Image: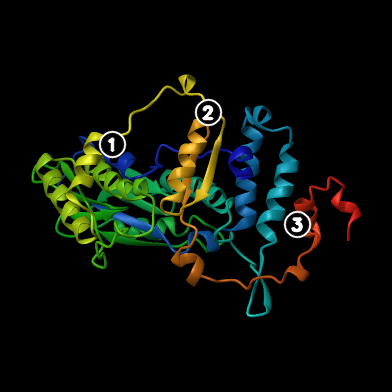
Amino acid sequence: MWGRKWLPSPQSDHHVMNSKDLAEDLVGILIDDGEEFISHDVVSLFTNTPISEALEIIKQRLTEDRTLGDRTNLSVDDIMELLEFTLTTTYFSFRGQVYQQKFGTAMGSPVSPIVANLYMEWLEKEAIATAPVNCQPRMWKRYVDDVLEIVSKGAAEQLTSHINQVDKTGNIKFTYEKEEDGQIAFLDTLIVKKQDGSVKLLVYRKKTHTDQYLHFKSHHPLQHKLSVIRTLMDRKDKVITEEADKLVEENKIKEALKLCGYPEWAFKDINKKTPQKTDKSQTTTRGMVVLPYKEGLSQRARRVFRKHGIQTSFKPHQTLRNILVHPKDKRDILQTAECVYEIPCLNYAKILRRGNCESIWNTS
């Protein structure tokens, strides 16, 4: 994606990448009796990100970036012109009516998360630097639009009021939640305060969680099903801090997946085939192809490609998303403009059957 190449990367000590990163940051932390955990959440971040203000922040970051010339030949003005055009020309059609998004970044656009995150990075820097002493957070950890803080007890409302005033457009608004019974959820992690002020981490599941995972009998490659086990077990190992809790979580995972048809051998197979890091310099490959998955046929195709040093990856060719989700009107092919057309030749198949090498451009 072009945004990742040209735009500056987030550079904040307050940013966390995932639950594992959060767990590492919370190792050894101690909470005083007069402190508590709170969390903030931005209301509709993408569609409320102020474009003009975000562009100014990005332009300043690009101007200060001494490595920009190593990544692109475009000037800062060129990048800003392209970025402004991308962010201010969002159109879509729904039920025959054409709409234009007039504020914020577009949902689904690859550049939107980068722009919103850069604006949030500026906002949090301003919020922390200007926070009153009595509500200054001792810890601030943010994942996109979710923030986890340690503050003095009773300071949540004042801090929320303060950070809601940082964005001068008035569009970025935060809501907050306080810990209950010494516990607070953040991302998919449940943070629990212990009697000595230390914390332990558990896996958090919402009340609406149903333990429904990819069923073992579904028409998907075996490695996709095994990756469900591997992902859940990896989260257990990386997030949960105490061994007794890890054992409880492992049993819960097995019970849930067995209800989804997973056999006992699948769990043993995961333990035997833990992926090992390989030296890429010693691995020769001629590329990779992504194939639609068809049970039996796809495995045979993989063996053929492997003989020629080509890696393969499978993807489902029909999903519930493709079948059910249609948020925008499908454009008629005759209304498509400014693109490369493929015009099939009616006699192309006949030419191939005859073995005729005559150029198809001379046929009608």
Which amino acid does the dot numbered 3 rest on?
Ala
Q: CA distance from mark 1 to mark 3?
A: 61 Å
Image spot of residue 165 (x, y percent): 47, 59
Read off the residue under disc 2.
285
Name which residue type carries label 1: Glu
Q: Give neighbour class at mark 1: few <14, some 14-19, many 20+ (Cα, 10 Å).
A: few
Estimate how packed mark 2 is, as few (under 14), some (14 to 19) or many (20 or more) residues with alpha carbons within 10 Å. Answer: few
Q: Nearer the viewer, residue 71 or 182?
A: 71
C-alpha distance separating marks 2 and 1: 35 Å
Up-down relation of residue 77 to residue 318 (above or below): above
Label 3 packing within 10 angstroms: few (<14), some (14-19), many (20+): few
User: Which of these two is toward me, 155 or 175?
Assistant: 175
Q: How is the image coloured?
A: rainbow
Image quadrant occupied by the N terminus? top right
Q: Picture quarter containing residue 273?
A: top left
Name the residue carrying label 1.
24
Residue at horizontal 71%, vertical 72%?
A: 332
- In the image, 78 versus 301, the foreground residue is 301
Quadrant of residue 346 in the image?
bottom right
Front label number (2 vs 1): 2
The numbered mark, 2 or 1, whose residue comes first in the sequence reads 1
**Could you tell whether 140 is left or right of 102 in the image?**
left
Image quarter (top left, top right, bottom left or bottom right) of the C terminus:
bottom right
Q: CA distance from mark 3 to mark 2?
A: 34 Å
Q: Which mark is residue 349?
A: 3
Kind of residue indicated by mark 2: Thr
Q: Are marks 1 and 3 in contact (CB under 8 Å)?
A: no
Residue 278 vertical position relative to residue 361 in the rendered view, above or below: above
**Residue 339 found in image quarter:** bottom right
- At numbered mark 3, what does the secondary structure look like: helix, strand or loop? helix
Q: Position of residue 160 (x, y in %)?
A: 37, 59
